[in-house]
Image (spheres, grey):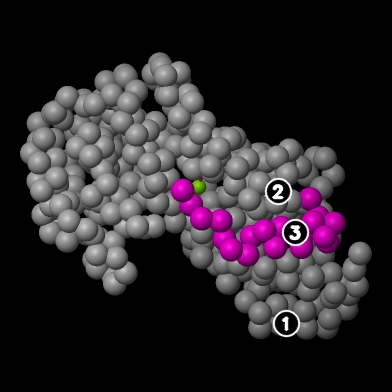
Amino acid sequence: ATPTAVMVGTGRGAENGILFRGGEHLEATATLDAILLDKTGTLTVGKPSVTDVVVLEALDAGPGVDRDVAEGAAGAAGEAPTGAGASGDAAPGGEAAPGRGGAGSSDLDAAQRALLRLVASVERASEHPLAAAIVQRAREAGLDLDEPESFEAIPGHGVQARLAGRDVVVGNRRLMEARGVAVDAAANRLAALEEQGKTVMLVAVDGRLAGLIAVADTLKETAPEAVAALHEMGLEVWMITGDNARTARAVARQAGIPAERVLAEVLPADKAAKVRELQARGRKVAMVGDGINDAPALAAADVGIAIGTGTDVAIETSDVTLMRGDLRGLVAAIELSRATLGKIR
Ligand code: ADP
Ligand code: MG
């Protein structure tokens, strides 16, 4: 392509919310043959919310726990108002915030509230979107949170804390295995939730499995049609995630990505290595992501593509930014680059 054609192409992209950082990236986009999509925030909306609070072993009432449960139970009486934008931080005994999908705070029993309170007290120190979902649910339920005595985040695994004299660990199966917590008793429930595409966090208290908290994130409405269009254009479409394989495959199925192209349980530090593995198989690879975790993978890819709703870090490390946070922009970017380079297959 002539320099003029490339300039016209990048200009046309900009008009449509597709920012190529330079003409060379427009040219590289035309040669892609594999697209690696991050799950959370790229294929999904990236705002998980709590769907299930499963108590496996009731917590013995620790200091302060039963006090709040009593308050909460009183406060939860009556229907939560639906619709109108009530504030997210409902006070105990006051109005409950409207629940998603009609599920208000009143549907949690005392044991569930005690578990949620404990977990949210730990998770409020975490910056992970999963943590935000749990804290949000606790607020909706009007729970008062406690201050942990210590807190540690374990990237790609979960969190652990000391709270009211208890050791609390919240995270995935791998973390439970590393801490010697037996999870077999919950295996069936875990599998059933994951089959629905939910991410399940296991909760251990003093070394024993106490419960499960599941969250769901919504697939972006336009994701299936974008994936279908990419396939139509002859591209391999892969999904990459730190989430477990069962959940990842369920989400991939909804998006139209084949199970054999799902890379799950990939630690944040290993995402870039997965990009290089595909490159070693001769693929020209685009990585599409939004998170801080994705920056090294974006940098390793032949074309790093940040999705507009993403973090500044992702946008800074990327070659292309899709301003609209919609995967149809990815399809348009590839079409535009191919048209500019005269590479229509
Ligand atoms: P991704 O960014 O792909 O969602 P991460 O690498 O951040 O994945 O996390 C991988 C898994 O580790 C999560 O699916 C979850 O099971 C667990 N995890 C990570 N952070 C937390 C947290 N703050 N609380 C509980 N579990 C967590
Ligand atoms: Mg992430």
Relative to residue 335, is residue 1 drawn left or right? Answer: right
Q: Residue at x 27, y 32 (%)?
A: 161
> SS at mark 1?
helix
Q: Amino acid at mark 1?
A: Arg
> SS at mark 2?
loop
Q: Which residue is mark 2?
A: 257
Q: Quadrant of residue 343?
A: bottom right
> SS at mark 3?
helix
Find residue 215 and name its label. none
Residues packed near mark 2 inside 10 Å, few (<14), some (14 to 19) or many (20 plus): many
Q: Amino acid at mark 2?
A: Ile
N-terminal of the pair, mark 1 or mark 3, is 1
Residue 150 seen in this snapshot: no
| Residue interval drawn in magenta | 216-236
> Which image quarter holds the N terminus?
bottom right
Q: Which residue is mark 1?
A: 12
Q: Quadrant of residue 333?
A: bottom right
Rendering coords of residue 82 (x, y %): 29, 65
Q: Residue at x 65, y 73 (%)?
A: 19
N-terminal of the pair, mark 3 or mark 2, is 3
Instruction: Tell whether position 231 is magenta.
Output: yes
Q: Residue at x 64, y 60 (%)?
A: 223
In front of the other: 336 or 54: 54
Q: Amino acid at mark 3?
A: Ala
Q: Which residue is mark 3?
A: 228
From the Cβ of disc 2, is ligand 1 less than 8 Å away?
no
